Amino acid sequence: MPDARDANGHLIRELHGVTLAVILDYLVAHYGFPGLDERLRLNCFAVNPSVKSSLTFLRRTPWARAKVEDLYIRLRTAEVLNRPLP
């Protein structure tokens, strides 16, 4: 994956100053909970999804958080580089 930088010049893949709540809000706004479930297959997006319950699960589950952060990085990189969205 090529290096892409945000508007402030920070590498997107480093998640500089980006909280999990901001990442989740961004992904939910872009894909919605059904789209996130389709891409990541996590129950927190499939069964009674909410931002609050998803944050609780993701903060306690490192492997799931890594999947969400990876999707965010791929999406933001594709947007910055004008490539097809994942």
Image: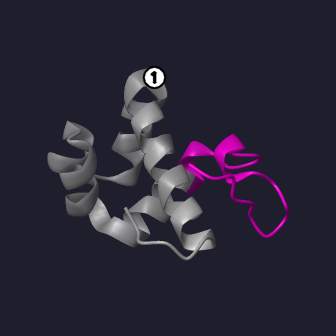
- Label 1 element class: helix
Q: Residue 23 in the image: x percent, y percent?
A: 54, 53
Q: Residue at x 52, y 66 (%)?
A: 78
Q: Residue at x 24, y 48 (%)?
A: 45
The magenta span reads 1-22
Q: Residue 71 in the image: x percent, y percent?
A: 43, 49
Q: How many callouts does the rendering have?
A: 1
Observer-nearest of 80 and 15: 80
Q: Residue at x 20, y 60 (%)?
A: 34
Image-based side of 83 in relation to 46, left or right: right
Residue 19 on the magenta segment? yes
Identify the amino acid type marked 1.
Pro
Observer-nearest of 55 and 65: 65
Q: Is residue 66 above or below residue 26?
A: above
Q: Is residue 5 above or below residue 60?
A: below
Image-based side of 61 in relation to 17, left or right: left
Q: Residue at x 30, y 66 (%)?
A: 32
Residue 53 on the magenta segment? no
What's the image's color scheme? Answer: one colour
Question: Quarter of the image holding residue 30?
Answer: bottom left
Farthest front residue? 2
Main secondary structure of the magenta stretch: loop
- The C terminus sits in image quarter: bottom left
Question: Is residue 48 among the parts visible in the rendering?
Answer: no
Q: Residue 18 in the image: x percent, y percent?
A: 68, 49
Image-based side of 52 in relation to 44, left or right: right
Farthest bottom residue? 82
Q: Which residue is mark 1?
A: 62
Q: Is residue 10 above or below residue 57?
A: below
